[in-house]
Amino acid sequence: MKQLTLFCFIIFSQFCFSSNIDKPDLKDFFILLEKLEYKKADSIITKLSDSNLHFSLKTMCQVLYHSGQNRVIDSIKVSELKSSEDNTYISAINDLTLGYYYLYNDPESQNSFNSFFRAKQKIDALSDIHFKKICLLALLQLYSKEIVQSNEQYKIYLDEFIELSNSNIDEFWKLYYSNYFYSTSIFTPIEAFYKSSKQLINYLDSIKTNSPIKSYLYKDIGLYFKTLKDSEKAIFHYLKAIEHAQNLPFLQYVRFNSYLDLAEIESKNKNYTKAKNYLNQASKHYNKSDKLKSKFIHERYGIADFYKNIGKYDSAYYHLENSTIIEAKIGYKKNTLRISELEVELGTAEKEKENLILSEQKTKNRNIAFALAGLVLFSSITFLLIQKNTKRKQLLAEQEKELETQKLTTVLKEQELTSIDAMIKGQEKERQRIANDLHDDLGGLMTTVKWHFNSLKENKSPELYNTTTKLIDEAYNKIRSIAHSKNSGVLAKKGLLKAINDMAKTISESNKLNIEVIDHGLDNRLENSLELTIFRVIQELITNIIKHAKATEATIHITNHDDSLNIMVEDNGKGFNIKTITKSSGMGIHSIEKRIENLGGTVTIESKINKGTTIIIDIPS
C-alpha cells in the first residue's frame, strides 16, 4: 500500500511539473501581441527562467515587429529556433513564428499555412484561449493577403475567433476582419461593407490615442469615405492613418496603401501636384520582402490612373502594360472594389475626354478649333489604335506560345496519370478475379471433397477420418481467408475516409497501437484511383509504424484545401536517421515517394531518434 501511495505521488508530481513547463502563464504577453505592442511584449519576457522559451518568444516578437521588412536578420533568428518536441508549448510557438516568417517573406508558398495549421493543432490541445486567439488572428491575416476572396474558408477561423472574444481588443479585430472580408469577398453585397464600416467609426474613440491599432481604423474608415466619394473625410482619415503608423515596420503597408489612395483622390479632384507627391511617397514604402507585388499595385492603381486623369494616355498605357507584365510574373488577381471603380472610370473616360475638348474649344475660334480638334483627336485615336493593336498582337503571340507549352505539359501529365490509374485498376481487378476463382471453384471443390470423406466414418476408420478432416479443415479455412481478400474493393464502396477509419479501428483494437484519424474538408469523395493510391500509401506508412517504430500512438491528419490535399502521419515511436534509408531498407519510403511524385505531389519526412516520426504529403488538387 505504501509503495502504491509513493508511486502515485511521484506520478502526480511529474504531471504537475510537466504541466508547468508545457503551459506557462503568458496571458499578458499574448494580450500585448494582440494590441500590436511588440516592444512591450518583448520587454515582459526577459525574466523567464526557461532560456528556450525566452528565445522562442523573443524571435516571435522580432518577426512580427519587422513583418518582412528585415528578412536577413529574421532568417538568422528563425534558423536558430531549437526543436522542442518534448515541450508542446515551445513547439507551438516555433510553428507560429515560422508561419509568420513565411507569411511575410515567402507569401506564395504553402509553408505559412502548414506552419499555422500545425501550431493550431498543438494550441487546441493545450486549451490556452489567449494563445489560441493569436493563432486564429494569424490565420485570418493569412487569408487577408488574398486581394479577392473567391471562397469563404476564412469564416471557419473568424467564427471561432468571435466565439472566443471576451475583451475590447477582441471586439476590434472581430469588426476589422469582418469589415475587411466584406470589402473583398465576391459573395457579400457592398451594403454589408458600409454597415461594418459605420461600426468601426463608432469604435474609434474606444482605442487609446497612441495605439498602433488606430492606424488600421483610420485607413479602413478612409476607404469607406473614399467609396462614398466624400473626398474631404477620406483624405482626413488617410492622413491620420499615416500619422499613427509612424515609422513602425509592421505598419508599412498602411502607409503604402494610404499614400496610394490619397494620390487617387487628389488626382480625381485635379490636384495633380499633390497626387504626384503622394505617388512618390508611396514608392518609398514598398514591401521590402515582396517589392514586385508593391510595384504592380503602384503601377496599376497609382501611376497609370494618374496619367489617365491628366490626359497623358500614352504614359497611362505604358504603365498599365508594364503592370500587366508584372502581374503575369506573380499571378496576382485584382481587388474587387478596384475592378468596380476602374470599370466605372473606363466607361466614362471617353465622355470626360469629349467634355474636356468642348471646354477648350470655347476659348478658340469655333470653326477652326473644331476642325483642328477633330483632326488631332482622329490622328491620336488612330495612332493609339495602331500602337495598341501591334502590342496586342505581340502579347497574344506570346500568350499563345505559353498556352501551347502548358497544353503539352498537361497532356503529358494526363497521359502519365491515366497510365497509373489503369495500372491500379488492373491490379484491383486481377486481385478480385483471383479471389472469386478461389472462392467459387476451389472452395466448392474442397467442400465436396470434405463431404465424400465423411463417409470414412461409416467405414470405421476414425484415425484416418480425424487426420483427413483436420487437414481438409485447415486447407478450407486458408482458402476462405484468401477468398475474403476480394473485400479489398470495399474502398470503392465506402470511400477513403471510411476505409481509413475502419483500418485505424481494427489496428487500435489490438491495444498495441492506438491510431487517431483527424480529417478536414473531406465532405465529398475524391476520384477513385486517387483515393485508392492515398489509402495504399497510408496503409504502407501504418505498416512501417507497426513493423519498425515500436510506437504506441499514431495520428493520421487528412486536410482537403481548395488547391491541395495535405496528409500528415505522426507517431511517437523510436524514430530513425533519414540519411540511412535506402531502397532496400524494407520501409517502402522510395515506393511511396514515387507514387506521390506521379500525382505531382511532395513527401517531407521529419524524424528524430526516440522522438517519433512525422511524414507530410502534399498533393495538388
Image: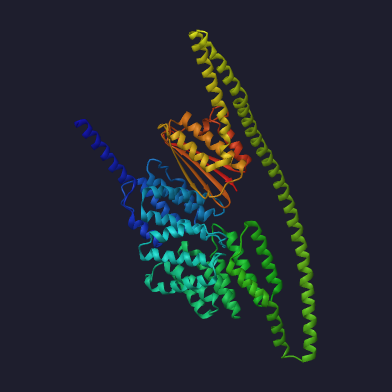
Q: Is residue 426 above or below residue 467?
A: below
Position in image of residue 393 (x %, y %): 78, 62
Question: Image point 69% across, 71% down: which residue?
Answer: 315
356 to the left or right of 570 = right
Position in image of residue 621 (x %, y %): 60, 48
Instruction: From the viewer's side, name the closer residue of 376 and 146.
Output: 146
Instruction: From the viewer's side, name the closer residue of 536 and 389.
Output: 536
Looking at the picture, the colour scheme in use is: rainbow
- Residue 397: tell me if it is visible: yes
Q: How many marks?
A: 0
Q: Quadrant of residue 439?
A: top right
Position in image of residue 537 (x %, y %): 55, 37
598 to the left or right of 76 = right
Report the residue that reaches farthest toward the front: 458
Q: Quadrant of residue 27?
A: bottom left
Question: Image point 43% across, 35% down: which residue?
Answer: 508
Quarter in which the N terminus is drawn: top left
352 to the left or right of 522 = right
152 to the left or right of 45 = right
Question: Image point 47% across, 54% down: which residue?
Answer: 100
Position in image of residue 114 (x %, y %): 50, 49
- Residue 73: tell me if it is visible: no
Instruction: From the viewer's side, name the closer residue of 251 and 69.
Output: 251
Q: Is residue 552 above or below residue 217?
A: above
Q: Is residue 478 above or below residue 179?
A: above
